[in-house]
Amino acid sequence: MNHQDKLVSRSSTVFKTLAIGALLSTGSAWAQGEGGQLEEIIVTAEFREANVQDTPLAITAVNAAMLDARSQTNIYQVAAQAPSVTLKPGGAAIGPAMVAFIRGVGQTDFNYALEPGVGVYIDDVYYPTLTGSLVDLLDLDRIEILRGPQGTLAGKNSIGGAIKMFSKAPNGDGGGSVETTYGSYNRIDVRGSGDFTILPDQLFARIAGVSKHRDGYVDRLDYACVHPNSNVPTFSVSKLSDCKVGTEGGQAYTAGRVSLRWLATDSVEINLNADLTNDDSEAIPSVLKRVNYALTGPGGATGPFVPPPVPALGGPVPGYPNARYPLVGFNGTYIMGVDGTPVYLSNAFVPYGPYRGDTEINDGFVNYGTYMDPNAYDPNTHQRYSPSAIRPQTTLDHWGISGTIDWEINDQFSVMSITSYRKYDSSFSQDEDRSPINSQFLLQNLEHEQISEEFRLNGSIFDGKLDFTTGAFWFDQDGTLEANVNLYYVQFNFIHGPDPTPSSNLAGFLHGTYHFTDDLNFSAGVRYSTDEKTYTHFRRNIDGSLPQDATPTNPATTCLGPPHNIANPSNCALVGLYNQGATWSDSRFDWRVALDYRWNEDFMTYGQISTGYKGGGVNPRPFILAQLLPFESEVMTSYEIGLKSDLFNNTLRVNGAFFYNDYSDIIMTLNPCFAATPDPSDGPGPCALPINAGTADVYGVELEGEWHPSDASLIDVSMSYMDFDYSETVTPVTLTDVPPFSPEWKWSIGGQYTWEMGDLGSLTARIDANYQSDIYTGPLNTQYNRIDGYIMTNARLMWRSSDDNWDAALEITNLADEYYFYTLFDQYASGGGTLSGQPGQPRMAGITLRRHF
């Protein structure tokens, strides 16, 4: 199909979708007649309060009542009803973090060297890292999800869009609530909030807190106990029951927020917020899906190449004259069995699915992970630092303070200052083989702090014809990553870091809207940004010593043959990566223009062009000095047209958008890559290399609808379609690949009905279903990193007392008990030879009792 044919095909898809959505919506409205009224939602997407239906942007706005009705308590759950938005809890490889993609733009790596593609804000404070962004929806007023580049107002790293959360402000009404939930897997949640007056008409306070505890939903079993006749030794000191040594996915989470609001004068308002989060949860759940025995079995080659057919032992590897099967000093991934013979990593440790080799267990929520390297100490091999073990854990201690000053100078001008400081420490472990056979495990420790200041001047001049916002933003952050990295499959065992990564951003912006008439508006904005980031690498052996050069007389290499040759010193490939730093800097000029016209009080259309960027940097994970390479910022120019309508006596809302993104210098992290071994003829080795992978044309259409057939009923729908086409790529990315976590299709539908029962109160039933089509979890799309499309269904039944003081709810999530995955970690054809994944939560139920006051 040529380019013109593709355009015709896309246009046909877009117009068919719009037509079907419009016909379904209007047909239902005409059939039902008058009903309940739509609620007005006020947003601040353009730094001033406005009805979401008057804002010329693609926005999904969700208020607190709808979050509660959908049983949504964590930010990632909100994506179910947001077109073109994918939010997932991070897998074991990235810890307590959120993977966020909007319109095919996002980030999957928590490392400070890489920037998120979706900006996350709470009360206008920027959260700059994936770690710490998977937040509880504690005492929120609303959430605004802005789709498309927000380069002029949000600025830094909001190239895909922005997620803005706003907490409830103190108002002195004395209101609040307390609730408790008990549910599946011994879930116990307690939430509460309260509003207080300290000084009448002047000083108010609000306190909110949450505590969440739940057992893990993935069982970790002792393989030798389950398979007593196997040759696998036991590594369990004690067992809980039924061969269980522990669980994964268990939660122990506590968070709180204190807010003060001071009406200092009639024109000055000061708000202070302080929040604290303590997360001491179990390791993130993961299961083993498949093992590539050609890599892990006897004679198996280490690394991301398996040339078919596998040659005889000792034979050459085609294309890699220095490599042999088995690789020198290494013969597959194994441990010594009870009888002294090797036990290799294989599908025998896969307990569920089409590649199950387990003879005793058939369960998708089981693994045999030990979080240890059980190999015996041997000074003559690379097992000089064995055995070793780590604690299964996911921890996060996160706190921050912020202050906002609003000064209304007069009827025309006002200023706002937003100052914040945040800090966190996090630690998380990963046992990627999920078996007693050590292939790869890591314990990663993060420290991070940030400080920011934003100043805004809002004005209205020319008799209200021109509204504008101008201001400046300063941001400074510093963080370190230290990790115990055990990659048995390449015989690496070393300390990564602590790698400091200081960075800063300074920006100035101007945005204005000119009102030609009451119905016709023109908006324009600019932002100039400067970024600087330094990354310093430190690599050491486990005992603190520095890796040694095996070939000091040969400057071209630091290892004798492959790094895992037993003649080499440990971690020889890492020579030169101690106190090795690099600095990246850039400056950007972003802009936006938009035109909107309100045809009548029910119908508005708009068009806009906007730009954005995601910052570049330096590869944070070089396994050899040759991988210490920079990558540049990715950039986007987006074209969007949209409509917003409140129809049929304000009972039906239909919003839609069509977008085209010109997306360039796209940053993707490669594994494998070919700058991976000291001598390329040895074949590619371990690699996690960020590169500018190419340029793409991205087309999409989005629809959102809400219909109130009556005062007692509500139906809401959403849909999105996205077509991502690379026009240029860098090898090994191909033109047919698509970005991770970017489904072609998404849809959702929800409905609720309320029965009024007089003095007995009311009963509200709600059901939600949402669908995402196939997604890939890596930039190189393969059958191994594909998550098949699925439908998720949730239900909720809530009773509320007639005086609105009490309510109780029964919720069921994953009603159909769908087996699906949040994320996958694919090393099947490259690296350790394993494919593992984080399974989504099975069907769970919970009962909540709440008291309002």
Image (spheres, rainbow, N blue to C red):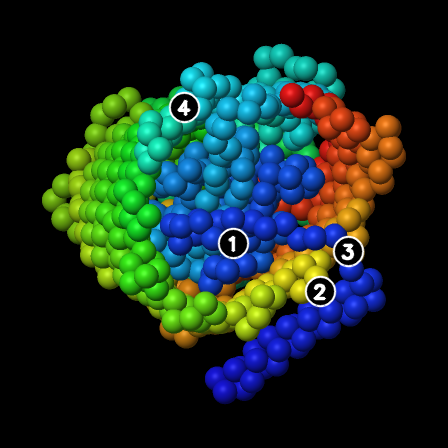
Mark 4: secondary structure: loop
Q: Residue at x 14, y 41 (%)?
A: 552
Q: According to the image, label 4 marks what residue?
A: 202
Q: Quadrant of the N terminus?
A: bottom right
Residue 617 vertical position relative to residue 763 in the rendered view, above or below: below
Q: Mark 4 vs mark 2: which is more N-terminal?
A: 4
Observer-side mark, 4 or 1, equals 4
Residue type for callout 3: Gly
Residue 123, percent from left and from top: 42, 37
- The quarter of the picture where residue 814 lies is top right
Q: Mark 1 vs mark 3: which is more N-terminal?
A: 3
Q: Give the alpha-carbon distance from disc 2 to disc 1, as whole Å.
A: 18 Å
Residue 519, percent from left and from top: 47, 69
Residue type for callout 2: Phe
Residue type for callout 1: Asn
Mark 2: secondary structure: loop
Residue most extreme to the left: 553
Q: Are marks 2 and 3 in contact (CB under 8 Å)?
A: no
Q: Neighbour class for label 1 at 10 Å: few (<14), some, many (≥20)?
A: few
Q: Give the alpha-carbon distance from disc 2 to disc 3, as whole Å.
A: 9 Å
Residue 513 vertical position relative to residue 178 in the rendered view, above or below: below
Q: According to the image, label 3 marks what residue?
A: 35
